[in-house]
Image (cartoon, rainbow, N blue to C red):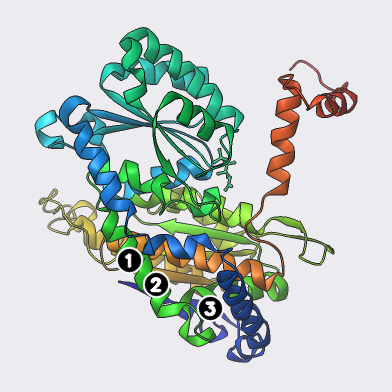
Amino acid sequence: MITYDYNYLMTDHTGDEHGITPDELNTATQLTDKALSRMDDEKKQGALGFLDLPYDTDIVPSIRAFRDRCGDRFTTIAVVGIGGSALGPQALRNSLSHLYLNELSDEKRDGRYRVYFFDNVDPYEIRSIEDVIDISKTIFLVISKSGGTTETNANFAIILEWLKKEVGAGYRDQVVAITDPEKGVLRKVAMDEGFTTFPVPANVGGRFSVLSAVGLVMAEFIGIDAEGLLAGARNVIEKNHGKPLFKNAPLLNATFHYLFDVRKNKRINVLMPYTRKLFLFADWYRQLWAESLGKRFDVNNNEVMTGLTPVAALGTIDQHSQLQLYLEGPNDKVITFLKLKQFDDDVTIPEFYKGIPEMDYLSHKSLRKLNGFEESATELALKEAGRPSASLIMDRLDPHTIGELIMFLEMQTAYAGYLYNINPFDQPAVEIGKKFTFGLLDRPGFDQFKQKFELGYRKKDSYII
Ligand code: PA5
């Protein structure tokens, strides 16, 4: 269960200048009603695949059957993808499995696979992974919705050659393609090669795909219950979808962020968990919020240049890094804390220099309590400084709650896009970058992008420092 606490977003607590009044929320209902009916329409038209994923009950048994076929023959799974095809699996891996899973002994891993990510074109990173994984024991999940992403295919090519060299003809058993059910060159290659495949439904884009095979296949191999994730997501849909503003937490939080932007000039949104296990989750949210809301044109083709800048911070570490800025710098941020009510484990600080009060005050306190106090102290300090914050309070870290959090943030993002009257599901600017890269790599059909690059790239004003 997740509790949404928005007290410190309101003027009562944060002051007239920097909070939102109940009246401002009430007058937003015209807009939120429009957002609700747009979601309803798009869902009926079949455009919102992310809302259907939690109801795809066939996917988990098919993943488990594949997992059983692999059995003990392999010990490691590697995700080859980028953007939405990698950030979701990374968020799941960290929030729901041991932080040092790969370093655990076989006995302690107890059948769970080790997991690695190839999500950049970085020779240092690839070489480092090559040095530690046993390729003959590794399943490679090549994940790309479009199938044509340069970074993913470059890594796939390197891995394929390496696999063929090390395991010969059996390489086909070790490649799984997770891609569009019909379109794209990866789908074609996978069919020709006879790789195992899982679909990314056509109406689900990369950053909204974590609850499809994109996240669930890896999840099941490292001991995360995919069913639990889907059940949590269903719970959030059933409690909120179609409900009016004050009964719909994702819509309410989207509305606050929208109002803070258009009325209070606060366009930086910090997501600040208080456990490292959720830090990569904040990274996944960064992409979701940035790529969905950063748009030049609205749906009527008016130039609007919308966007809220997401920032990932980590408590308590960033109290000693970012907090000075958040408290005394420009009052242009809205902070959302990700709090955990229960940690599965706790550590008690032992007696510490009894007789020295500056040390002894820590004696016998629990780390869980200390963590909670630090978070409350930060929240209070922000409130006192008139800096708005909200909290998402999670009962515990388990698949059900993470499924809830994923769906909460996905629905919130879609609603925010509707409030700005933009399309939150496309990424035209990212596509342009991809085309320039194709041009530079001399991919047939993209010469015009190479020519544009050559014309534009005449930088003269650099010097050696
Ligand atoms: O959210 C998105 O659509 C993007 O971030 C994509 O996930 C990213 O560009 C990778 O694309 P693909 O999955 O097609 O390889």
Q: For disc 2, does the CB lie below 8 Å from ligand 1?
A: no
Give the mark toward the camera: 1 or 3. Answer: 1
Between the C-alphas of marks 1 and 3, the distance is 19 Å
Between the C-alphas of marks 2 and 1, the distance is 7 Å
| Viewer-closest of 415 and 278 | 415
Mark 2: secondary structure: helix
Q: Could you tell me if the residues under marks 2 and 1 are in contact, i.e. CB atoms within 8 Å?
A: yes
- The answer to whether any part of residue 311 appears in the image is no
Give the mark toward the camera: 3 or 2. Answer: 2
Q: For the N terminus, which image quadrant?
A: bottom left
Label ID, residue 232:
1
Question: Mark 1: few, some, or many residues within 10 Å (few <14, many ≥20)?
Answer: many
Q: Position of residue 48 (x, y in %)?
A: 55, 64
Residue 131, by quadrant, is top left
For badge 3, the amino acid type reads Leu
Q: Where is residue 228 in the image (x, y as percent from the top left)?
A: 27, 60
Q: Name the residue carrying label 2.
A: 236
Q: Which residue is drawn at 67% across and 49% down?
A: 427
Q: For the C terminus, which image quadrant?
A: top right
Q: How many marks?
A: 3
Q: Is residue 13 left or right of residue 465?
A: left
| Viewer-closest of 221 and 304 | 221
Which quadrant of the frame does ligand 1 lie within? top right
Q: Name the residue carrying label 3.
A: 252
Q: Which residue is drawn at 58% across and 41% down?
A: 183
Q: In this view, does 446 lie to the left or right of 206?
A: right
Q: Position of residue 119 (x, y in %)?
A: 49, 32
For badge 1, the amino acid type reads Gly
Q: Could you tell me if the residues under marks 3 and 2 are in contact, i.e. CB atoms within 8 Å?
A: no
Between the C-alphas of marks 3 and 2, the distance is 14 Å
For badge 2, the amino acid type reads Val
